[in-house]
Structures are given as structure tokens and as C-alpha cells.
Amino acid sequence: MFDSGNYSNHTLAALPCPADPAENPITSTPKRPLVRPSIFTLRTTLTAIALATATLAAHAADAVRIDPQRLSQDVKTLSSDDFEGRGPNTAGETKTVNYLIQQFQAAGLQPGGDVVDGKRGWTQDVPLGRFEIQGPVTVSVTAGGTTKAFTQGNEVAIRAAMTGEKSVDFKNAPLVFVGYGVTAPERKWDDFKGQDLKGKLAVLLINDPDFETGKGDFGGKAMTYYGRWTYKFEELARRGALGTLIVHETAPASYGWATVKNSNTNVQYDIVRKNPLEAHAPVEAWIQRDVAVDLFKHAGLDFEKLKKQAQTRAFKPVELKGVTMSAHYDVDAKVITSKNVLAMRPGSAQPDQVVIYSGHWDHLGVGLPDAKGDKIYNGAVDNATGIAALLELARAYAAAPAPKRSVVFLAVTAEEKGLLGSEYYANNPVYPLAKTAGVINMDALSPYGPARDFTISGSAKLDLLDRLVAKAKQNGVRYSPDPKPEAGHFFRSDHFPFAKRGVPAISFGSGEDWEQGGVAAGRAAEEKYVSVAYHQPADEWSASWPFTGMARDLGILYAVGRDLADSNAWPNWSRDSEFRAAREASAAERK
């Protein structure tokens, strides 16, 4: 079923061959007797030679060679047990960072990281807050005069507080239903209507108001950032709430309660913030749907009826009268330092303008053993493939003529902890975001044979995607929109911290319409990976992976980035995008 052919280096496009030798001013034989050239003729000839040389250099840039065997070797190395699952702040991080630096150096790239003592290094320090609940979580709800104890991970999944406080303790906090918890002025939408939430817990719904109906002011099924749980936690922190209780429902969340439980009851990380309460309320938690419905009943409210009201602009917050929550738990908070790794191919004409390729080097490290006793979460597909892609693209740029703009290769940390390495970079950019022409992110690429299509995470509209679609079409590959835009994949990869600051950014995804086996084969492989290997110790390198599809796709990504790096263009978002205003706010810096 899989394409297991053993291919040599993949070539995206062949160099153009003139039909007639006379068409090439460098190699043509003169068709008339040689005479002593005039100064004018000499200048003209030299100009023609210079132009032809530049043209050939441009064509050579498109004819990049990507080596599937080298991709396989990098993935094999990075996902080996020796790298211990590449967890941040572990020995696995040290090995990973050293390997990346060695490979970038061997390729001939220059350091692209922080300047220390007047010299640019290979890394950017990323201070991270590490937060872990210590001891038991005591939580209870009082409704109708009766108090019931909840169990962490069963009725609720409470995250370790990321405010820096050593404990969370509150009694009889009121609960207020705030619909979807959205404030979207551009859509004339406000779920809060001036509701005071200080000292109160906000109960709200996951996803957008359009999710169930598929139509409305939020673009239908496709999730906007307003539907993402991260936005909801941030918005309630901005409003000074004691905390947030997100009602879990599998369809709008796009995953079951087990995922919520496993992701929210373990160690949490965040970037180090000067004012953490601006981004995090003391309580950030999820609650099971059936549990929430029961609480609404005790307050004399109909959950489904209020959900329907929340799908309209007319919705107003509703207090769950007679229902309160109390809780106590201790939190261990400390600061660690992880590292982003950066390499650069300096630009020849506008070195202060950059194009960025990115991918996250981290995975889950060492954790709970699986049924076979394996405790190392190797992360071969997620995301040794993306880092192997980054290294191979770096080698291609190093071997080609210098682009006009600088090209940066950014390997970020702590994606698995919440896009923290990319968030830190975007908040503390080594290269100004206003002069970053675009970001191409690579995460969990397919190691199999070529597909007839490709996709991106989410359904955003932007010029950078148009460029990618056009280049792929030239190579016989079509664009397939994200098959599950309601899952919010756009907000779940490392391009997003750039996007929300206005930088045109996409996260490339491998296609599922395989040349050998079609959509059925591609979809079956994806479903098997998600069920058997995704975020599990079984995500390990296989000698049977050909990497030929990934090599073909990287040729396309090289060509898109190279064209942008050799241009003066500044791609933008579509006019109705929530990110366009942020980009246009920095327009003066690009003049």
C-alpha cells in the first residue's frame, strides 16, 4: 500500500534548456564574423551576460535537491531512545540542541540567535514558568443546600494555577454562565454585557456560537480564535474573573474527556510574564457536560435552552443562583530555561528583512509506560519530521546562491506545552516581526510516498497560501482545505503566535490523497497513527518509511520561500481576517 521505492535525491524542477543555442547569450556561437566590438557593444554584451547569469541562478534556486535518505537519518537520530523523547529542561533537550547546532554548522549556515557579548549565538534562551499541583485537589459544589465533593479528573479537570501563587483557596464562589465567553467588536458581539465577574467563576461553552448551526457571524463550522479554549481563559483573565469553567462537549472540542483530563491535570508551563494575572485567572478548568447540566438544573435553568440563546447577539449572562463552588490546592511554581535554536542564511540585498521556516524540536520526554513497558515518547512523526525538514531546507539554502532577504531557520521549544517557544519568540523577536515577510511552519509531516494534494492547518485566507497553492499547482499538486476546520487546528501549531501578531504564517500539512492507494490509504494511515502512535511511545522511526513524499513537498516549500526571499513583496491577510489589522498597524516600518 505504501510507496517504498528507494529514490535518490528528489529534484523539484529541471533547469530550462533553450531550444536553440543562439537563445543563450552565454553559450551561443556567433552567427556573424567576429569584429572588434565597440564600447557600446561590449557594455551591452556584459549586461546581457549579467542578466543571464542572474536568471540561471534563479532557476538553480528552484531546482533544489532534497534527499529522502538524509530526512530518514535525521528522524531516526532525533527520535532514538538516546534523545529521551526530547523533553524541555532534560538531558534530551541538551542532546537535541547540540545536534541541531552541529547540523546547521555542517551545512554552512550562520548563527541566528541572541547576541551575547557582541556575538550572535545559535540559541535564544526561553525562560518558562513550570507549574504543578502539589498534594490533593479538594473541590466541592454546593447546590440547593447540599454539598457534593468532586474528584480531580472525573467531574472537573483543574489546571495548576499559572499566576505564581503557591496555593489556590476559595469558598462559595458564585457561578455565572457567560455563553461562549466572546467579545468580538468587529462582529458586534459581546457575551458579557457589562457583567462583573470579580470573585466569580465563569461557566462557558467551547468553540464558536456558529458551531452547531454551521452559519452565522463567526464563519460557520470553521473555528475562529474566539472558539479556542486559550482565548476563553485569556478573556476571563482580562475581565478579572476568579476563574473559568469550560463545559466539555466532545464534538465542539474535537476530542474526548480523556484528552482534556490528561492535558490539564499534569505539569503546566507558560512563558515568564511580568503580570501573569493579565493572562491567567487563578482558576482555569474544564467541567464534564453532564455535571454542568445537573448544576444548571439545581439553579432552575435549562442548559440546552441557554445554549441556544448564547448563539445569538441578544444573549445576556445568567447567574446559577444557589450554586457555588469551593476549592483548595497547592501549587509548586518555578522558572526553568529552555532554548530555541536559530540558524540564518544572510540576505544579499535586504538582510534586515526575513523569511522564516519553523518547526518544534520538543516532544513529551519520558512518561507513563505503555502496555509494553516503554516509557520514552520518541516523537518520530511529531515532530522529528518537521525538524528533519528544517535541517534539509537549511542545507538547500546554504548550497544555493544567497537570497536577497535573509532566511531564518527557527527550531522552537515547548510546543507540546502550549506553543511556548514560538510564543516567546514572537513576543521577543530576534528579527522584527514588521520586517518578517512570512512564516512557513512544519509539524508532523508524512514519512510515506507522495500525495496528490497538500493542506494547511485551519482555513485562514492569506496571500502566502495563494503563493503556495500556485507553486504546488506548477508541480501537479493540488490544495485540499483542512478537512476539520471546526477542530481549530490553525490555533494549535507554532505559526499561530506569529499570525495573531499580524505576520503572514501557515503550517504546512501533508496530503492524504496518496499516489499509491488514494484517499483511502492516506486516511487509513492517518487514523492508525492517531489511534496507535500519536502522543504515545509507539511514535517511533521505521526503516520502511521512504520519505519520498516529504522530499517532494519540501521542494515546493523551498520554492515558495525562495521566491518570497528574492522579492520585495509583503504578503498580507485577507481583508476579512482578524489578523489583518495587526499587520497593517506595522505598515510604516516596511516603507
Image: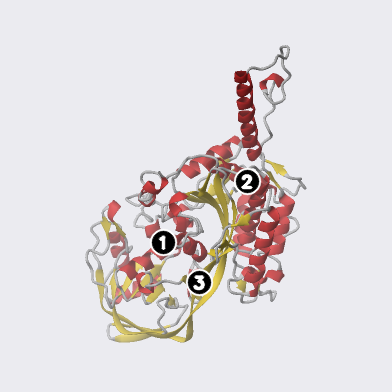
Of circles 3 and 2, the one toward us is: 3
Amino acid identity at mark 1: Arg
The picture places residue 50, in percent across and down from the top left corner, at: 62, 30
* 308 sits to left or right of 69: left
Q: Which residue is mark 2?
A: 553
Image vertical order of residue 291 relative to residue 124, above or below: below
Among numbered discs 3 and 2, the one appearing first in the sequence: 3
* 194 sits to left or right of 65: left
Among numbered discs 1 and 3, the one appearing first in the sequence: 3
Q: Which residue is mark 3?
A: 127
Q: Residues within 10 Å of mark 2 (few under 14, many from 20)?
A: many
Image vertical order of residue 225 relative to residue 468, above or below: below
Gap between marks 1 and 2, in whole Å?
29 Å
Q: Which residue is mark 1?
A: 228
Q: Residues within 10 Å of mark 1 (few under 14, many from 20)?
A: many
Amino acid identity at mark 2: Asp
The picture places residue 235, in percent across and down from the top left corner, at: 34, 66
Gap between marks 3 and 2, in whole Å?
34 Å
Which of the two residues, 139 or 240, is positioned nearer the viewer here? 240
Q: Residues within 10 Å of mark 3 (few under 14, many from 20)?
A: some
Where the C terminus falls, by quadrant? Answer: top left
* 423 sits to left or right of 93: left
Amino acid identity at mark 3: Pro
Is residue 575 among what the camera can see? yes
Q: Is mark 1 in CB contact (under 8 Å) with mark 3?
A: no
| Residue in the image at 59% along x and 42% along y | 559
As helix, strand or loop, the secondary structure at mark 2 comes to helix
Gap between marks 1 and 3, in whole Å?
25 Å
**Quadrant of the rendered structure where residue 327 is?**
bottom left
The picture places residue 104, in percent across and down from the top left corner, at: 66, 57
As helix, strand or loop, the secondary structure at mark 1 comes to loop
The picture places residue 376, in percent across and down from the top left corner, at: 66, 72
